Image (spheres, rainbow, N blue to C red):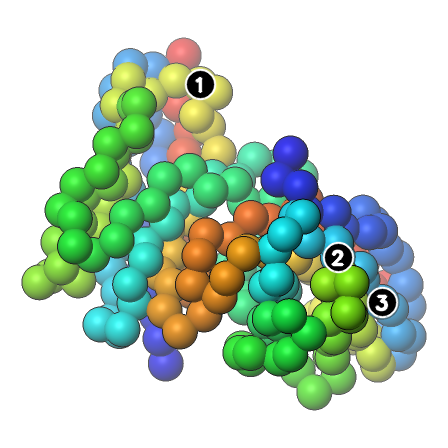
Amino acid sequence: QQQVKQSPQSLIVQKGGISIINCAYENTAFDYFPWYQQFPGKGPALLIAIRPDVSEKKEGRFTISFNKSAKQFSLHIMDSQPGDSATYFCAALGQGNLIFGKGTKLSVKP
Amino acid sequence: DSGVTQTPKHLITATGQRVTLRCSPRSGDLSVYWYQQSLDQGLQFLIQYYNGEERAKGNILERFSAQQFPDLHSELNLSSLELGDSALYFCASSPQPNSPLHFGNGTRLTVT
């Protein structure tokens, strides 16, 4: 079965710190790797995404690092802010099927 | 606002009943996806439609069914409801099957 494994399950970071969330996948047919941010009572919102021909993508304070040979990718949130407190999901898309990790609940303390 | 509209926002019903959840995709999006989110299972893919045709199926129970209509809106039908079906149900849409998904704000289903 296709899986995406995400860690940690929860993360507490001080304001201004770096938040790092890791994901690993198994199926080499995946060709698109998005990260979603979800606030309570809302649907997941697309945050940033990467394709496997690129090793890193940066958008503002958010960076995805991608290691194709290890089948791993990670989200780095620089200068974390209390407003970043949310649940983050990594995902992998292949053959029209978007598979999610189980999520990381991030709390940024002021 | 993602542009994906889901109704109703909340639904409370009893075991054994049947409900219909509705989704209107973003303008121009041909693909519609349904996901179930529960505390212990995360976001589980249920089913995908593209331009009216079923394209992919995930962990969808036989008691559940869905369809996409000619105007591209979609409905998810849940029947013989059980307590364990209580969850958030999300619809997402995308222009093509392998392009980014945009999610609605979900329907919270409570089965009592």
> Is A88 placed left or right of B103 in the picture?
left
Specify the label residue B23 is tagged with: 2
Helix, strand or loop for disc 1: helix
Dot 2 alpha-carbon crowd within 10 angstroms: few under 14, some 14 to 19, many 20 or more:
many
| Host chain of mark 1 | A
Whole-angstrom CA distance, mark 3 to mark 2, is 10 Å
For image coordinates 28% across by 17% down, the residue present is: A79
Specify the label residue B44 is tagged with: none
Whole-angstrom CA distance, mark 1 to mark 3, is 37 Å
Q: Is residue A48 visible?
A: yes
Dot 1 alpha-carbon crowd within 10 angstroms: few under 14, some 14 to 19, many 20 or more:
some
Q: Is residue B41 visible?
A: no
Specify the label residue A82 is tagged with: 1
Which label sits in the foreground, 3 or 2?
Answer: 2
**Above or below for A13 versus B24:** above
Q: Residue B17 location in percent, x, y? A: 91, 75
Whole-angstrom CA distance, mark 1 to mark 2, is 32 Å
For image coordinates 54% across by 66% down, the residue present is: B44
Nearer to the camera, A93 or A86? A93
> Is A66 placed left or right of A14 in the picture?
left
Nearer to the camera, A108 or A76? A76
Helix, strand or loop for disc 2: strand
Q: Looking at the figure, which quarter contains the N terminus of chain B?
A: top right
| Amino acid tagged 3 | Thr
Nearer to the camera, B19 or A105? B19
Which label sits in the foreground, 1 or 3?
Answer: 3
Q: Are marks 1 and 3 on the same chain?
A: no
Q: Which residue is mark 3?
A: B20
